[in-house]
Amino acid sequence: MSTLLPFTFTTPNLPTGPASKEQPLTNPIEMLLCHYPLGRYRQNPNFMLVHARPNPFDEYQGSLYAILTAGSDAPLAPSTDPLKKKFWMKTYSENKGMLEQLEAQGILRRTGEEEEQGYVKLIAVETIIQHGQWAEFCSGCETYEDLGGETRLLRCSVCKDTYYCKKECQTTHWPLHKAVCKQFRKEAAAAARRT
Ligand SMILES: [Zn+2]
Ligand SMILES: [Zn+2]
């Protein structure tokens, strides 16, 4: 199994230099791409940017840095490479400038597909990094993988698209997951037949 691939990110809102109690977050920020399963459309998986490790100067800092996926029903063919994923990315407002950095770091690439959504344009992107290199999200306790973890999350053996940090998380989440699990499995089988 491949290991998590951290990368650095800079934002004009932060100073550069060593972090401290007074300035807990500085450039460059160490990030991970993180996949999360809360979308309705499998063809448009959800990705966010999360901090690669807990902040030693700010114990209250959440893992989430930015949501990358745009909420869109526009059809987007899944990636032809089963180890990669394609999704519609929001590149405006708070996400302005992010895609350029993620391209430069070799994390995402544009597929060339675009979708007008009202006054804005959604950009289709595909991961350059592969399954295993991005973090997964535990659907049970809603925590993310980061560089501090000793083991990787467990994958639902039926749909192979939902992850859990421990058996109890899977058990407690099963009543909710049951319906989509079947649907995910069907869609994955259909996608496999197409390729
Ligand atoms: Zn969990
Ligand atoms: Zn499942």
Image: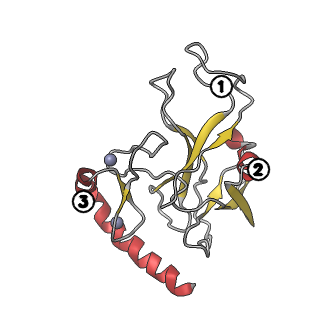
Q: Can residue 98 be seen at all in this image of the molecule?
A: yes
Amino acid type at mark 3: Pro
Q: Look at the numbered disc 1 and give the secondary structure of its residue.
A: loop
Amino acid type at mark 2: Ala
Amino acid type at mark 1: Thr
Spatial distance from mark 2 to mark 1, Cα to Cα?
20 Å
Mark number displayed over residue 54: none
Q: Which residue is mark 3?
A: 175
Q: Which residue is mark 1?
A: 26
Q: Earlier in the sequence, mark 3 or mark 2?
A: 2
| Residue 30, x across and y down, in percent | 61, 37
Which tag is nearer the camera, tag 3 or tag 2?
2
Which tag is nearer the camera, tag 3 or tag 1?
1
Mark number displayed over residue 104: 2
Is residue 104 left or right of 162 when viewed as pictured?
A: right
Residue at point 23% right, 56% down? 171
**How crowded is the residue under tag 1: few (<14 C-alpha within 10 Å), some, or many (20+)?**
some
Q: Look at the numbered disc 3 and give the secondary structure of its residue.
A: helix
User: Would you say the beta carbon of the disc 1 residue lies within 8 angstroms of ligand 1?
Assistant: no
| Residue 185, x across and y down, in percent | 39, 74
| Residue 165, x across and y down, in percent | 34, 50
State which quadrant residue 149 falls in: top left
Q: In the rendered view, tell whether residue 74 sits above or below residue 104.
A: below
- Counting the numbered discs, the total is 3
| Residue 77, x across and y down, in percent | 61, 74
Q: Look at the numbered disc 2 and give the secondary structure of its residue.
A: helix
Residue at point 61% right, 49% down? 68
Q: Can residue 115 be seen at all in this image of the molecule?
A: no
Is residue 161 left or right of 134 when viewed as pictured?
A: left
Q: Earlier in the sequence, mark 2 or mark 1?
A: 1
Q: Earlier in the sequence, mark 3 or mark 1?
A: 1
